[in-house]
Image (cartoon, helix red, strand yellow):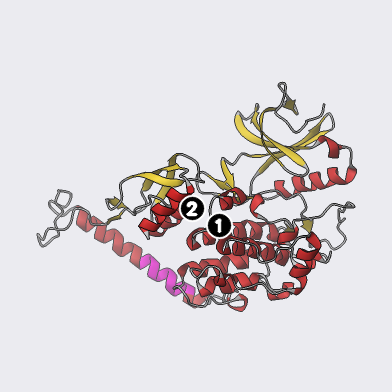
Amino acid sequence: MGYKDEEPGQIEVLGDRYLLQSRIGRGGMATIYRARDLQMDRVVAVKVLREVYSADPKFVARFQREARAASALQHPNIVQVYDYGQTDGNYYIVMELVEGTDLRSYLCSRDVLDVDCAIIIAHDIALGLGAAHRRGIVHRDVKPQNVLIGIDGSIKLTDFGIVSMYKDANAERITTSGMTLGTVQYFAPEQAQGEIVSPAADVYALGIVMYEMLAGHLPFEGNSAVVVAMQHIQDQPDPPGQFNPNIPAALEEIILHCLEKAPGARFPDGSQLARALEKLGDAKMGETVPMVHHLKPHRNHRSFASIITTFILLATLFLLCFSLYLAVQPRFINVPFFTTSGTTTSPTAGFIEVPDLRTMSWLHAVATSEKLGFRLVLMEGQPNGVVVDQNPRAHYKAARGSTIDVKLEILAPKMGLQLQNLRE
């Protein structure tokens, strides 16, 4: 039984467990189906190696390598692999189904991303890469097509099809005549030269993705793969701030640091890049974020830790006593609120103003809400649209930590631009 690149023509069950329902995607090597796990009673994604490659030992080895590598990784920013196997010569991988879109499709619907949105995406991808790097795994194919954006705002890295175990210098290197391992537009220089790669190669690729999200185009483009590969090796990228003046200097510095030619001059792995982006989120616009040598954790002296612990315990005790004191004060729970002196306080004390999210993209709305302490819930629509309605309404008072329900719709490009201009 072979699976063609089309909708299942009849009821097909893999491994006596996974009922294929419909095709939802196709890559160079495999077709991805929406399916139901009959044992766990859940919807999953099943990636099936295309029939033309099932008889090729090298492609099968690559497919199995992806299954083994991804199944060993458990992280919120990596698509989870539940199972893998083969039925009647058809090799498959069972993964969590991420309802939403991929970053490539998301980028196609807009010129550039808002800075906050780009930082959120890059940070989450870096966290996922950091988890892989700690296991000695290099992804080697980080690109927008392999980044999934869920309708819940989750960012997940997928497709570990050409991973390498960089800590094993004698690991078999899978190559096939005419088959490129990776996507040349996102190649690190050492990858373009066919060298053994380290986690710094993934950092470089993520730097390219960050550049593309914010500048609206790739740093290196050409009419052939060879031309682009040589640019990665020899040419310096134009600073992305030349194409988007909204990019903070500190963020541009991080991007260019990722795109250093020498692996040792970049952030060493995804975790270090994530820390730099976290620092950027707390820094003021235009300030310089400390680079790699400042990212290493400092030693904590025991005496200092003891002082901090004691202070936290005392503060907690004070707050508890103060809360009990307030609870027994007369009329404390009445409306309007009263202080012990009898002075009236605002009934909205502790509440903050709900932001106006209308006309924002999903990720922009998520970033704006999270900055103020709200959680965003997509009640209707797809994440590639813009917010057209929200509850609570803009400028209402709501408790920090509460949710904002939003409805998204895909607007005509001119209309969306006009609405955005009005907001600005």
Q: As rendered, which of 304 and 129 lies closer to the eye?
A: 129
Residue 363, disc: 2
| Residue 382 image position (x, y, % from top left) | 50, 41
| Circle 1 residues within 10 Å: few <14, some 14–19, many ≥20 | many
Q: Which mark is residue 121?
A: 1
For the C terminus, the quadrant is bottom left
| Element under disc 1 | helix
Residue 136 visible in this rendered orientation of the protein? no
Please tell me whether residue 150 belongs to the stretch shown in magenta: no
The magenta span reads: 305-314
Above or below 91: residue 240: below
Circles 2 and 1 in contact, beta carbons < 8 Å: yes
Q: Quadrant of the N terminus?
A: top right
Query: What amino acid type should be assigned to the residue bearing mark 2?
Result: Leu
Residue projecting furthest to the top = 10
How far apart marks 2 and 1 lie (CA) works out to 9 Å
Q: Based on the displayed image, in which of its 4 quarters is residue 222 positioned?
A: bottom right
- At 38% from the left and 70% from the top, the residue drawn is 311
Q: State whether residue 178 is above or below residue 268.
A: above
Determine whether, in the image, residue 255 is placed left or right of residue 405.
Answer: right
Residue 259, picture quadrant: bottom right
Q: Main secondary structure of the magenta part?
A: helix
Residue 187 appears at what percent x and percent y? 74, 62
Q: Amino acid at mark 1?
A: Ile
The answer to whether residue 351 is above or below residue 382 is below
Rendered image quadrant of residue 194: bottom right
Question: Label for residue 186?
Answer: none
Q: Is residue 247 left or right of residue 266?
A: left
Left or right of 252: which side holds 327?
Answer: left
